Image: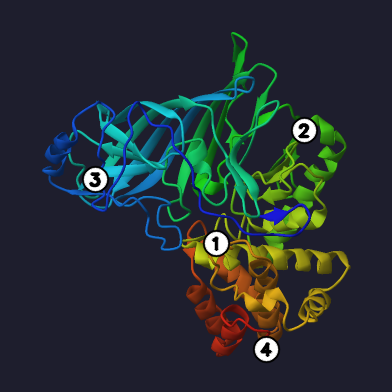
Amino acid sequence: MASGRLAVVATAVLIGTIGATGCSASRGDSGATTAVADGSAPGDEMAVEQHQGRAGAAGIGDPDFPNDGNGGYDVGHYRLKIEYDPERKYLSGVTTVEAKATQNLSRFDLDLSGFTVGKVTVNGAAARFSRSGDELVVTPSRTIPDRSAFTVEVTYAGQPKPVRNSPNLGTYGFIPTSDGAFVTSEPNGARTWFPGNDHPADKARYDFEITVPEGVTALANGEQVGSPVTQGGKTTYTWRETHPMASYLATVTMGRFELREGKTASGIKNFAAVDPRYSGSLNELYNQSGKITEYWSKVFGPYPFSSTGGVIDDFPAGYALENQTKPMYGGFNPGDDVIAHELAHQWFGDSLSIRRWKDLWLNEGFATYAEWLWSEHKGNASAERIFRNRYAVDSDAAIWKYAPGRAKPDDLFNDSVYTRGAMTLHALRQRIGDPAFFRLLKTWNAEHRYGYVTTPEFVALAERISGKQLDGLFDAWLFTAKKPTTW
């Protein structure tokens, strides 16, 4: 993620009032719901508890965001069937979740904010469900055995409610616009438009079927499957992302767009879309996205996905987000430095994902350093010069008081995570030299392609490739809340 003003700030955990399905439900310390959607008495829940198996946890286990994601299962694939009416700002959807149990599962949660849920089935059989905050609590008719595959289908509808007034992102999630919707979900806004496991630690593949009024274009991750189908004044678009993707990177952005499609120099599909207000930027977005993708493929290793490009929409978000295969630029014409940042994320953050938000510097520090490398590549300011300019800031500046190796949940997108994270990489480059440093970047991507990464893993790889002990460097730059004096 990057700001359109290149100033990045923090976000807050999603908090909101959730629309229930004809009942109110709360979860006590035991995790049990006290009312269910079919009107059963609270005591009937005791029968459910007698099933063999255990309830999946209401969070995936990230201590900084304890209610994000869910336990007890791992999602492999989402099928999202969505119809959206921009005039009424009304969404109706059927989400199918294909998952595998990681325990004997008597009950499990999906993350969902708002909406009225009409029906839930598990393996085709009707399931009991209730609401508890942002949790859709599902009790299947029988326990799901450990390691077995199962399918959940949720039918829901309502007006999407994005997260608003977060401390520094402003608004995120499913954001209605005058002609459609701007959909950027970092860190936990996927739940504002579909039920799922809303945490980057559970990546999955996605199929999208999006129906909108005729004349409106619907965009999603990956590549379009076939041509749009128009019938009865509505058009249905089908998109598919065949590579694993974190939930916050998914999008179904809709509106009136001008499009350009083609391929990069090496044959990667390139897709650019801009709101008519930004029509003059279409060719620049297309060309720069292609050139930068090609260059990063040389620096970081092969491009991890099947298409590249970007989208400029007429919503004044003031930030950009690295939605997988389609970075989103909210209400501004991105310079090539911002495009370089978001496309670097296709490697650092999208292909290589963090299991816990505390490691966010592995996304943002790397993408920020990519901006410096792009400047250097173009013959503008070198990474060394940029580093020196940043380092010249007074020792009592705020950036030195925030150790970026441990991102804070109440200040997740602090500038230190970006800038000091990037400075850490340059200090490392100086210590181990260019040959080892750039070999490290390619090896890091090759060894963790489509997987998950942690800071200790990066430190260990840097030491293995360089043959140097680097604890002191990383401690000073990532984990000490003061200005480093040596590196």
Given this view, does label 1 or label 4 mark the residue nearer the observer?
1
| Mark 1–mark 2 distance (CA, rounded to whole Å) | 33 Å
Q: Report helix, strand or loop for mark 2.
A: loop
Please tell me how crowded label 3 is: few (under 14), some (14-19), or many (20+) other residues with Cα within 10 Å. some
Which tag, 4 or 2, sits closer to the chain's start?
Answer: 2
Circle 3: element type: loop
Residue at mark 2 to residue at mark 3: CA–CA distance: 47 Å
For discs 1 and 2, the disc positioned in front in the rendered view:
1
In the rendered structure, which disc, 1 or 4, sits on the residue that comes first in sequence?
A: 1
CA distance separating discs 1 and 3: 28 Å
The image shows residue 217 at horizontal and vertical percentages of 67, 26
Q: Which residue is mark 2?
A: 275
Who's the residue at 36% across and 50% down the image? Answer: 70
Q: Residue 263: which quarter of the image? A: top right
Amino acid type, residue under disc 3 in the picture: Ala
Say which quadrant the C terminus sits in.
Answer: bottom right
Q: Are marks 1 and 4 in contact (CB under 8 Å)?
A: no
| Residue to which mark 3 is pinned | 32
Using the rendered image of the protein, determine whether residue 222 is visible from the camera's viewpoint.
Answer: no
Residue in the foreground of this view, choosing between 171 and 404: 171
Q: Amino acid at mark 4?
A: Trp
- Does residue 266 lie above or below 278 as drawn? below
Residue 481 left/right relative to 76: right
Label 2 crowd bin: few (<14), some (14–19), many (20+), radius 10 Å? many
Q: Which residue is mark 4?
A: 487
Q: Is residue 143 visible?
A: yes
Viewer-closest of 337 and 228: 337
Q: Vertically, is 396 above or below 203?
A: below
**Residue 420: mark:** none
Which three-letter amino acid code belongs to the residue tagged 1? Answer: Asp
Identity of the residue drawn at 19% across and 45% down: 145
